[in-house]
Image (cartoon, grey):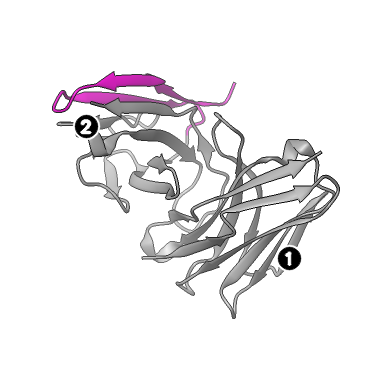
Amino acid sequence: EAQVTQNPRYLITVTGKKLTVTCSQNMNHEYMSWYRQDPGLGLRQIYYSMNVEVTDKGDVPEGYKVSRKEKRNFPLILESPSPNQTSLYFCASRRGRAGSYNEQFFGPGTRLTVL
Amino acid sequence: GENVEQHPSTLSVQEGDSAVIKCTYSDSASNYFPWYKQELGKRPQLIIDIRSNVGEKKDQRIAVTLNKTAKHFSLHITETQPEDSAVYFCAAINPNTGNQFYFGTGTSLTVIP
């Protein structure tokens, strides 16, 4: 089944404790992205990647890191989480490169709480 | 970058009535406009999209219109049903900014049976 998976689905942690949220897709998509969803603010892009070893900042990259060592995986790293990073996070992927318009598939979401 | 505004933030309609959600964008270079539906507790899913070389697109009860001159696009849902209740997001994609997706803030639609 073609899908985007994320782990963990739920996470409660404390300020300053490094964490990684994994994202994997099995559709051989070039483009992958991370979003955070907050009430009243919609979906805001954190980082995106057009292909392996290519990553770029989105609108709200502060406090986050990503890597794209393999085409299928795009982990989101919070080196020192803070309470303002409490949010619902979505990973997404789509086929194609710049100039192409293909459906973006979202993962199931990770609800993160930072105490 | 791009700024996408979406209205209204909440919308209630009677079953069978039509619903219209409007979005505006700021950068005339944006050229792809998808709409996503997010049911409670679930992930966003694409329901319809439109490219800048098209003025209108329909898919059964849903349609999207695009006015490039005014830089706004709208989602139209006819004969609404309770299962249409969800949060709807519009988005604009700008090829000049690496094909970033810029989302609106969402519209919570409630269809009253």
Is residue A99 among what the camera can see? Answer: yes
Identify residue type, mark 2.
Leu
Q: Is residue B78 above or below residue A49?
A: below
* Residue tagged 1: B56
* Residue tagged 2: A78
- The quadrant holding residue A48 is top left
Q: In the structure shown, which secondary structural element does the residue marked by tag 1 occupy?
A: strand
Say left or right for B72 vs A44: right
Residue extent of the magenta highlight:
A1-28
Residue located at (15% from left, 23% from top): A17
Whole-percent x, y for residue B102 in the image: 45, 56
Whole-percent x, y for residue B22 in the image: 62, 63
Identify residue type, mark 1.
Glu
In three-dimensional space, the C-alpha distance between marks 2 and 1, rounded to whole angstroms, equals: 42 Å
Residue located at (31% from left, 33% from top): A86
Q: Chain of mark 1?
A: B
Residue located at (19% from left, 34% from top): A82
**Nearer to us in this view, B91 or A54:** B91
Say left or right for A71 vs B31: left
Quadrant into which the N terminus of chain A falls = top right
Q: Is residue A58 above or below residue A115?
A: below
